[in-house]
């Protein structure tokens, strides 16, 4: 139970509320007992027959009979097919997670910390008061040991709250555009791009001189620039956020940032300097040379020194935010992998166990074959061939089942097709190798049978 709780904690923050439920426990026990009874009864029923003829048969050459052989083959085929489907799911999800981890998010996540804060609004009601507290906080943060740069913003990339509630969006239009468009808006201080490591590819970043008394400026990302200024340099162009009453001048173009996660395209984004818009402080961003614990302690110290009434509602590293952005894919891959390995172990042990039982029941037949001149290599091929036939049929069934499963995983896959050849052939090869080893062990035992000893015991 403790393991399941720890595992679920990776998917939901309410995992600690999970406890052992009696109804679920008794249901699981009942299902386990019922399954054991059903399949145990099938095995017993398959062995029913004429007791007298059964007692007369020599145990050295007894067989299951046609119905027993068919049941055995069906079970082996089903085990192989089921394990193949699960392993395909695990392989596709693992490849997707690997590709997502290598996507360039547009910012440098290493050693960046985001701290969510809430001001006491009764003390900071005007733009001037909020700008003043923000300036004092940044000055205090830059004086903390280990902090390389600091910024304030209305949010940050991969912010879980923004992903849940949506970004602050505003309509805008250009000088040459009569209709309005929508862009995600983020307000930030001058060191925002430096702190996050977002490069400015054209123009400049915000400057300290971009104050309320100066001309209003903005920075757009590559996506917005490509959509509305594809045939010209957007730097120096103007946008209006209020139907043309006031205009802001574009002073730079920032690199696209994967705001919604590495698997989604960057939105059209517009950055505005907080010094010109009286932004309420929501997030403190710092880049540090120290670890997250030391950095978080330094930020808390600075905030308390500026105003003890500022509430800290969360602390999160960008590395953790990046991992959380692909958590669903990671959990899905882990679950498929766990159940796939269990199914593979069951299938391999089933193939090996049934083949070993078959060899033990065919000792006399094998001894006669070898006494009549059959070579060990021929016996080895015969036994392995018997076992691998069911495995190959299971793989064929598994390919069909995996095709149906992967169509349901399409929305979770990234950079991988649902019928990815490398994954399908790789899993097939894995299963064939594992099954071949499982078949070889009882086959090796068969070729070691001494015909004279075996027949004399008859």
Image (cartoon, helix red, strand yellow):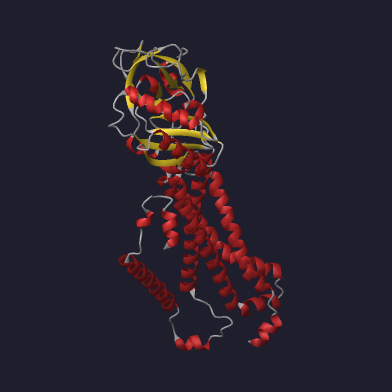
| Residue in the picture at 47% in, 62% down | 78
Identify which residue is drawn at 52% across, 40% down: 101
Residue at 39% x, 32% y is: 155
- Residue 360's quadrant in the figure? bottom right
Q: Give the image location of residue 28, x and y in percent.
A: 36, 67
Task: State whether residue 39 appears in this view.
Answer: yes
Point out residue 303 in the picture as x, y percentages from the top left corner.
Answer: 42, 36
Q: Nearer the viewer, residue 224 or 453?
A: 224
Q: Locate residue 7, reporting x and y percent.
A: 44, 55
Image quadrant containing the C terminus = bottom right
Q: Is residue 174 above or below residue 192?
A: above
Q: Is residue 53 left or right of residue 161?
A: right
Q: In the image, what residue occupies the spot 39% across and 21% down?
A: 275
Check the image and report above or below for 31 versus 63. Answer: above
Q: Is residue 430 left or right of residue 374?
A: left
Please indicate, yes or no, whether residue 158 appears anywhere in the rendered image.
no
């Amino acid at each position: 139970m403790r393991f399941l709780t720890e595992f679920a904690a990776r998917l939901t923050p309410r995992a600690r509320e999970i406890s052992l439920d009696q109804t679920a426990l008794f249901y699981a026990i009942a299902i386990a007992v019922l399954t054991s009874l059903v399949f145990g009864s099938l095995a017993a029923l398959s062995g029913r027959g004429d007791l007298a003829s059964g007692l007369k048969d020599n145990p050295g050459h007894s067989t299951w009979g046609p119905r027993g052989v068919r049941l055995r083959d069906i079970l082996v085929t089903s085990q192989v097919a089921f394990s193949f489907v699960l392993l395909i799911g695990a392989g596709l999800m693992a490849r997707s997670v690997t590709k997502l981890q290598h996507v360039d998010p547009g910012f440098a996540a290493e050693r960046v910390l985001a701290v969510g804060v809430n001001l006491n609004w009764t003390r900071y009601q005007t733009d001037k008061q909020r700008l003043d507290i923000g300036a004092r906080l940044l000055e205090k943060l830059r004086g903390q040991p280990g902090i390389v740069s600091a910024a304030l913003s209305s949010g940050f990339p991969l912010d879980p709250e923004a992903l849940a509630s949506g970004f602050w969006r505003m309509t805008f239009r250009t000088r040459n555009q009569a209709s309005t468009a929508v862009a995600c808006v983020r307000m930030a201080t001058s060191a925002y791009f430096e702190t996050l490591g977002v490069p400015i590819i054209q123009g400049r970043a915000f400057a300290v001189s971009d104050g309320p008394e100066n001309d209003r400026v903005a920075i757009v990302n590559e996506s917005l620039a490509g959509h509305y200024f594809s045939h010209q340099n957007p730097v120096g162009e103007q946008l209006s956020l209020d139907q043309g009453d006031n205009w802001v001048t574009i002073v730079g173009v920032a690199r696209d940032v994967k705001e919604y996660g590495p698997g989604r395209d960057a939105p059209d984004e517009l950055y505005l300097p907080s010094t010109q818009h009286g932004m309420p402080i929501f997030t403190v961003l710092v880049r540090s040379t120290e670890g997250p614990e030391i950095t978080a302690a330094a930020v808390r110290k600075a905030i308390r020194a500026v105003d003890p009434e500022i509430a800290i509602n969360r602390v999160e590293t960008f590395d953790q935010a990046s991992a959380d952005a692909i958590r669903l894919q990671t959990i899905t891959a882990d679950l498929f992998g766990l159940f796939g390995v269990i199914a593979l172990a069951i299938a391999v042990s089933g193939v090996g166990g049934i083949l070993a039982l078959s060899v033990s029941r065919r000792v006399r037949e094998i001894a006669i074959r070898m006494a009549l001149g059959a070579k060990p290599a021929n016996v080895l091929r015969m036994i392995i061939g018997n076992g691998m036939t069911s495995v190959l049929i299971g793989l064929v069934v598994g390919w069909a089942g995996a095709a149906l499963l992967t169509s349901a995983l399409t929305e979770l896959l990234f950079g991988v097709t649902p019928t990815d050849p490398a994954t399908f052939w790789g899993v097939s090869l894995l299963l064939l190798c594992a099954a071949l080893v499982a078949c070889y062990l009882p086959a090796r035992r068969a070729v070691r049978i001494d015909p004279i000893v075996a027949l004399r015991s008859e």
